[in-house]
Image: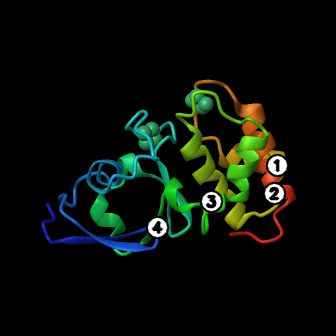
Amino acid sequence: MRTAAIELVVNGTRRAIASEGEASLLSVLRDEIGLTGAKYGCGEGQCGACTVLIDGVPRRSCITKVWSVAGKAITTIEGIERDGALHPLQEAFLVEDALQCGYCTSGMIVSGVGLLKTNPHPSDAEILEFMEGNICRCGTYPRILAAIRRAAAGNGGVR
Ligand code: FES
Ligand code: FES
């Protein structure tokens, strides 16, 4: 067990963490830092509700030990907007009405942002493959696909 103090960089802010290193990143984000956008779904890395970006890459925070991401850039749904403006994918989710209960939505958007960072104009097949690990119990997949398409279509400046 690692007991040294851990420092996280969450949405651009450095934070000293009191939780032990074996704690899950999701529990630290939600219970210690108070960022509750990432959701606890399966707790086993299977549903994607807890997705955050680690150095720009989507990761399941429920199965990520907090010590393993010390010093890395962690981006949660709360850090996706810029200067009060929603990310284009967040706007697209609203325009396409791509949510029902919303439980999966932050994970969907964070994963989608990760996709658009590396592939600004993905094909439908690439979107489906990339988003395969994000589950929506409400079945809004067609509208989620439409939202990612919409954001990609206007994706002149990826962020
Ligand atoms: S809660 Fe993390 S993948 Fe389901
Ligand atoms: S909108 Fe309900 S789980 Fe996706």
Query: Which residue matches tag 3?
Result: 114
Q: Residues within 10 Å of mark 1 (few under 14, many from 20)?
A: some
Amino acid type indicated by mark 2: Ala
Q: State the CA–CA distance, disc 4 to disc 1.
A: 26 Å
- Are the residues flagged by discs 4 and 1 in contact, CB closer than 8 Å? no
Mark in the foreground, 2 or 4: 4
Q: Regarding mark 2 in the picture, which secondary structure is present there?
A: helix
Query: Which residue matches tag 4?
Result: 11
Q: State the CA–CA distance, disc 1 to disc 3.
A: 14 Å
Amino acid type indicated by mark 3: Gly
Q: How is the image coloured?
A: rainbow
Mark in the foreground, 4 or 1: 4
Tell me which label, 1 or 3, sits earlier in the chain. Answer: 3
Query: Which residue matches tag 1?
Result: 149
Q: State the CA–CA distance, disc 4 to disc 3.
A: 15 Å
Tell me which label, 2 or 4, sits earlier in the chain. Answer: 4
Tell me which label, 2 or 3, sits earlier in the chain. Answer: 3
Image location (x, y in percent) of residue 29 = 35, 54
Image-quadrant location for residue 93? top right
Amino acid type indicated by mark 4: Asn
Quadrant containing ligand 1: top left
Q: Regarding mark 3 in the picture, which secondary structure is present there?
A: helix
Numbered mark located on residue 152 in the image:
2
